[in-house]
């Protein structure tokens, strides 16, 4: 019986329909646990989280990248806003539905997730979903971070809970943005509280996590969330915003912890101006980079999915961009890794950040840097 176990993953993998997303590129494979965290202090506000942990494991299988209903709703929503994502022969829905993510399989004896690795929270964009960032999150986790992506119930387009219940926000864009970001800041602090809650973590099949090495990053309104969160919660030691402007009142004294600002080549002036506000209020190491051939929405996994499914990833240049998605992931992972590790060590630096590897990523330009 025991001898058959190693074969099981192969059978599961071979039976699966769909296409496989890329293996994470770092030193580790990755385990994935998903589940709800309920904040009873906020009328049972119910987040969903995905926890990606670096692990030494010799067996990976592929699992659905997102549940079917989420794929259907997200595809319909995306096509409404960006009709370029589909054409007469190509449907966006199956692209989301049929993606499969490689993860470690096995029990506690055959998988050993790294204990005490630093924790990085990831916050999605407005009307987005945590499920749009799985490829990036697993690539980042494979560098040795526990990466936790969270759905924000205030504006995520759809949240699908394990019992089949759906939270469907049809009106995300109607609420004032600052209000959404304050809610999201509280989501972040709540998740950090729960990392120490043995009961809540056990319900996700996880141990508790230390909260002495915490960073946060996010895309668009998720970047705004990262800036709000680092301003309100002193457990967060470093942040990065991808095209996310300041939308809330930051502490009057500013933010005394390191922040990495990342812009696509085509951010709106509104976004850039709001990021500048964050720049001026950061009183610690700060770096602003810009990535060529990338659009604001291109930070999602969409181009990685197109490429993995055998389509042209550059088919929507005005929505996503034309950069190779594997290269984009290498860029985002490399900069995030050096930035966060530097902050946790109390000393920002590394060859990339010091500008010692100018040819490594030709798409990246340093707009400005200060205090390191
Ligand atoms: C990751 O999993 C693959 C199997 O999919 C295995 O070949 C590889 O050795 C594993 N790597 C690590 C670092 O565990
Ligand atoms: C993975 O395989 C390597 C080489 O066969 C072995 O040394 C190691 O103990 C295995 N790791 C686990 C976690 O099973
Ligand atoms: C999701 O959709 C796929 C493809 O239509 C199907 O094979 C699979 O059974 C569905 N999964 C669930 C849980 O309904
Ligand atoms: C959102 O729209 C869908 C499809 O039109 C509908 O089924 C669902 O009930 C709506 N949800 C809410 C909360 O209005
Ligand atoms: C966030 O939490 C703070 C502190 O508990 C509270 O004062 C504030 O009202 C909360 N904001 C929202 C939008 O829930
Ligand atoms: C810890 O988690 C449990 C289970 O989700 C929950 O009932 C409890 O209120 C949490 N405790 C705190 C202090 O948040
Ligand atoms: C955006 O900012 C640039 C540079 O400051 C300026 O040249 C351009 O006119 C602005 N565009 C709009 C629509 O305001
Ligand atoms: C539609 O998109 C697919 C996927 O990228 C592409 O292969 C195909 O050529 C496109 N068809 C048309 C008619 O533009």
Image (cartoon, grey):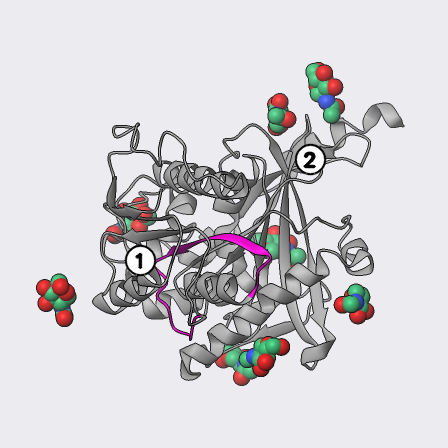
Which sits in the foreground, 291 or 345?
345
Residue 131 seen by the camera: yes
Question: SS for tag 2?
Answer: loop
Q: Quadrant of residue 121?
A: bottom right
Report if residue 247 lies within the magenta region. yes
**Overall secondary structure of the magenta stretch?**
loop
Residue 86 seen by the camera: no
Q: Is residue 340 above or below residue 162?
A: above
Ligand 5 sits in quadrant: bottom right
On residue 114, the disc is 2
**Residue at image x 28%, y 52%?**
264
Q: Quadrant of the N terminus?
A: top right
Q: Position of residue 37 (x, y in %)?
A: 70, 65
Mark 1 sits on what residue?
296
Mark 1 vs mark 2: in front: 2
Q: Position of residue 304 (x, y in %)?
A: 41, 44
- Name the N-terminal-most of marks 1 and 2: 2
Q: Which residues are magenta?
A: 233-250
């Amino acid at each position: 019986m025991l001898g058959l176990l190693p074969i099981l993953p192969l059978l599961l993998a071979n039976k699966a329909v769909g296409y496989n997303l890329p293996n994470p590129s770092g030193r580790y494979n990755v385990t994935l646990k998903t589940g709800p965290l309920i904040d009873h202090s906020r009328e049972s506000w119910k987040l969903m989280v995905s926890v990606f942990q670096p692990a030494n494991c010799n067996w990976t299988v592929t699992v659905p990248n997102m549940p079917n209903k989420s794929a259907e709703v997200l595809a319909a929503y995306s096509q409404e806003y960006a009709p370029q994502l589909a054409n007469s022969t190509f449907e966006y829905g199956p692209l989301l539905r049929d993606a499969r993510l490689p993860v470690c399989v096995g029990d506690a004896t055959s998988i050993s997730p790294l204990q005490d690795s630093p924790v990085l929270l990831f916050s999605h964009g407005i009307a987005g979903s945590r499920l749009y960032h799985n490829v990036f999150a697993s690539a980042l986790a494979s560098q040795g971070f526990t990466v936790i992506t969270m759905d924000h119930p205030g504006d995520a387009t759809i949240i699908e809970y394990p019992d089949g219940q759906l939270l469907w926000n049809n009106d995300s864009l109607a609420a004032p943005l600052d209000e959404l970001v304050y809610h999201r800041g509280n989501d972040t602090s709540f998740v950090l509280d729960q990392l120490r809650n043995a009961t809540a973590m056990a319900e996700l099949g996880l141990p508790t996590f230390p909260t002495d090495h915490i960073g946060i990053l996010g895309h668009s309104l998720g970047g705004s969330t990262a800036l709000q969160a680092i301003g309100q919660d002193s457990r967060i030691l470093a942040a990065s915003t991808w095209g996310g402007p300041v939308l809330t009142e930051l502490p009057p004294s500013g933010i005394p912890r390191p922040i990495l600002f990342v812009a696509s080549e085509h951010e709106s002036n509104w976004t850039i101006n709001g990021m500048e506000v964050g720049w001026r209020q950061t009183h610690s190491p700060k770096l602003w980079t810009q990535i060529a051939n990338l659009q604001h929405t291109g930070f999602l996994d969409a181009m990685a999915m197109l490429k993995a499914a055998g389509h042209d990833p550059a088919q929507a240049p005005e929505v996503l961009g034309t950069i190779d998605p594997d290269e984009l992931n290498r860029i985002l992972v490399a900069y995030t890794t050096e930035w966060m590790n530097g902050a946790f060590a109390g000393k920002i630096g590394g060859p990339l950040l010091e500008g010692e590897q100018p040819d490594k990523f030709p798409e990246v330009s340093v707009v400005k840097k200060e205090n390191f």
